Image (cartoon, rainbow, N blue to C red):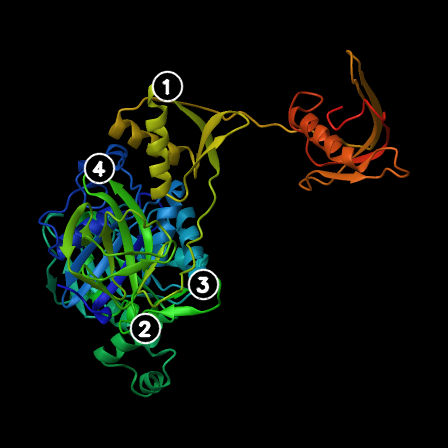
Amino acid sequence: MAYTTDLIRNVALAGHGSTGKTTLLEHILFSAGAIAKPELVESGKTVSDYNEEEIERKISVHAALARIAWGDKKINIIDTPGSSDFVGEVILALRACESTLVLMDARSGVQIETIKTWRNLDVRKKPRMVFINKLDEERAPFQNALADLKDKFKGNFVPVTIPMGEAAGYKGVIDVLNQKAYGVPASHDQKESSSDVPAEFTAAMAEARAALSEAAAEGDDELMEKYLSEGELSQEEIVKGLAEALAGNRVIPVFAGSALKNSGMLALLDFFAAIAPSPHDHAKESVKGSDAFINVDPAAPLAGMIIKTQIDQFSGKLSFVKVICGKLGTDTDYVNMSDQKKERPSKLYTALGKKLEDVKELYAGDIGIIAKSPTLRTNDTIGAPERSEQFLPLRLPQPVHAVAITATSKKEEDKLSELLHKAAEEDYTFSVRFNSETKETVIAGMGELHLNMILDKIKHSAKIAVETRVPRVAYRETITKKAGGEHTHKKQSGGHGQYGKVVLEVEPRTRGEGYAFENKVFGGSVSKGFVPGIEKGIHQAMESGIIAGYPVVDVKSNLMDGKEHPVDSSEMA
């Protein structure tokens, strides 16, 4: 089934490591009927952590797409890693999704990766929600976590669900928006069921609903007037007001729960479907080389951007695409704006982790996969033949940790190079280059863990043994003060000889200014035809340096004087 733009929701899951993102997604998928049984991270069988490296280390490494149907809505959820080593995967998800659910461990409060995610969302002016997790644990009171959020970040934090009890006394959540309670299931692989709100929590729910109504009314004069005069809003008015406030970043909805206990999932799903922003009115992309934007528009000619590349051992190259305008189908011709080549998708997929499901078309706002395109790369723009715009490439942080690498067996050097370049095609925060000065292949990434994960994947998939070491430093030489000198070259071995005298002055330049040469000879003591040869000789001398044999940089050479012979002088001399 193809979903039109207004029925699509794109939500990223982000937050510090071990806050429960993968576990939350697993139980959302179970609650929505997308999977028959929720797995635990320790089992190595979760939907979003399916690579060998993720299974072995029990952490998320890649952004993973999972689609679900809830009511008449399609919800695309992208689970992201919590380690800073894989920040590139987080950034691509935040760009692709109209809203983000930030997970928070109630015991730990706001942590560093949460702060980084928040700042990234601020830069993008993207709506966000917060799920306060692990409320069934000791020393994890909901109000303390909420207070920490308000202390660390600006914004109107409004609980949509509140907990019934805490720690060992945690009994579930109250859905304030829909005025019902969800008890904790007897087991995490059983679904929640709703009931009336217990009498002991009705006062807390009434207080939270008043705050929810006030947040819905703010920014809408008509709703605010009604709220002030009557003291309450209808259910439809609260939903409408919250949807507008969330899309406008005027409210930050907060949810309570325990992902591990499968508690708080149904209220979250209902909120995503009813209130989370759709791409239709709330998504736009910047145009490269312009201040213009292109809004998500199902009626406009096709435009889409490649948000991620994945090279799968069995499925081949997968290009994750977000359709911005029009419709992309298996019968659609499009142009890759990077090289102007026309293509047609051989297959289109939607994804449930590693499970790929065929679809015939993707509407504007949807996220899917183009299979086995030989030319598409991350950041490419695809479009109808009549389009010419390219979307602004995603800006990612530069690698900060580098090692030199070689294959243990010389016979496998070419294969290793091929695999490293494939890894760089998948991950734009990873780079590989050959240093011609030190004669080393150097790989760089966001940290030691990042590089280890890439190398582990290569070892597992290709059975190649590698050795790494600290890269050699390509030193440079320079001078610190002005100096002068002269040299006379004489060579006589019968016939024409070689003769030349050069008087040079060298002076330092500012770091990074490079090399400069100036001919200051007056009176014709050195013919102009010999000057290029002198400069070439200076260049050759600079390549091997004077003190330790390293290239000389940031100097200026002044040719002051010289002497030549009418027969024996030449450019070579």
Whole-percent x, y for residue 160 in the image = 27, 66
Q: Is residue 399 left or right of residue 499?
A: left
Whole-percent x, y for residue 152 in the image = 45, 56
Mark 3 or mark 4, whichever is nearer to me: 4
Mark nearer the N terminus (1 vs 2): 2
Above/below status of 408 relative to 529: above
Q: CA distance from mark 1 to mark 2?
A: 56 Å
Disc 4 designates what residue? 313
Residue at the front extreme?
495
Disc 2 designates what residue? 281
Q: Nearer the viewer, residue 169 or 51?
A: 51
- The residue at the point 26 percent across, 51 percent down is 135
Mark nearer the N terminus (1 vs 4): 4
Category of crowding for the residue at label 3, using alpha-carbon neighbours closer than 10 angstroms: few (below 14), some (14–19), many (at least 20): few
Mark 2 or mark 3, whichever is nearer to me: 2
Q: CA distance from mark 2 to mark 3?
A: 25 Å
Disc 3 designates what residue? 154
Disc 1 designates what residue? 410
Q: CA distance from mark 2 to mark 4?
A: 38 Å
Q: Nearer the viewer, residue 507 or 68?
A: 507
Whole-percent x, y for residue 550 in the image = 64, 25
- The residue at the point 41 percent across, 39 percent down is 430
